[in-house]
Amino acid sequence: MCQKILAGIIFGLTGCTAMQEQLGFDPVSANIDGAVAKYAEAAGRVRLGDSRSDVLALLEPTQKGVPAVHRKSPDKYFEGNSSVEIFYFRSGRSADGLTTDDEFTPYQFRDGKLVSIGWAALGGPKTVAGRTGAEPTPSSSPPPRTPGNNVLCRDAVARGDQGAMMVHCD
């Protein structure tokens, strides 16, 4: 008797999955969209100067439904004597099937305090929806190389120069 009930449940679930596929329902996209909506509700409560632990306690729960392959790992490095951490939260989804930088909002912490929200402080996203693969976003020609030129460092980051995140920019 139990075997017949179990077989019926399995058959029903299989049929449900097949019907979802026929109707075009994508559970991964639905999970990402749900996380984006939760993020939108929580993001307005974050303020510059907030502690890393307060921001993560507020925003990390919004990302629980996002599969690991559709997340962006944090960046961590030292800049002079300061510890810099950048956490990325899923704040959008494009229907192109790619996971690109413009679908995330970066939160940059310096020594445990939130110092920037968004891509402006980082020189813009490296990849954007609608472009092929990991094609970098176009950038203007770099400014002249002068000591302490922050713009040069940000431009290198925007171009995808892997070493740019490890250099000290005054």
Image: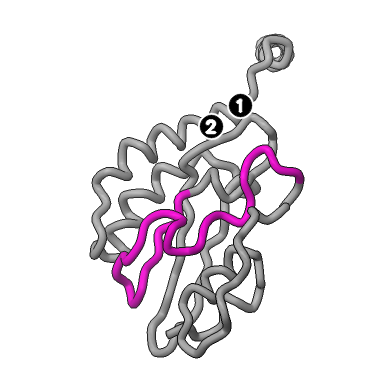
Dot 1 falls on a residue whose secondary structure is: helix
Binning the other alpha carbons within 10 Å of mark 1 as few (below 14), some (14 to 19) or many (20 upward) gives few
Binning the other alpha carbons within 10 Å of mark 2 as few (below 14), some (14 to 19) or many (20 upward) gives some
Dot 2 falls on a residue whose secondary structure is: helix
Specify whether 47 is left or right of 14.
left
| Quadrant that contains the C terminus | bottom left
Instruction: Locate residue 64, reporting x and y percent.
Output: 47, 43
Instruction: Locate residue 122, reporting x and y percent.
Output: 48, 64
User: In this picture, which residue range is highlighted in magenta?
Assistant: 105-132
Q: Which mark is residue 93?
A: none
Mark 2–mark 1 CB contact (< 8 Å): yes
Instruction: Locate residue 23, reporting x and y percent.
Output: 68, 10
30 is within the stretch colored magenta: no
Specify whether 1 is left or right of 71.
right
Q: Is residue 43 above or below residue 38?
A: below
Q: Which residue type does callout 2 highlight?
A: Asn
Per the image, the residue denoted by label 1 is 27
Depth check, front residue: 10 or 147: 147
Depth check, front residue: 19 or 167: 167
Whether residue 128 appears in this view of the structure is yes
Q: Which residue type does callout 1 highlight?
A: Pro
Q: Which residue is pictured at 24% across the width and 55% down the height?
A: 47
Depth check, front residue: 142 or 74: 142
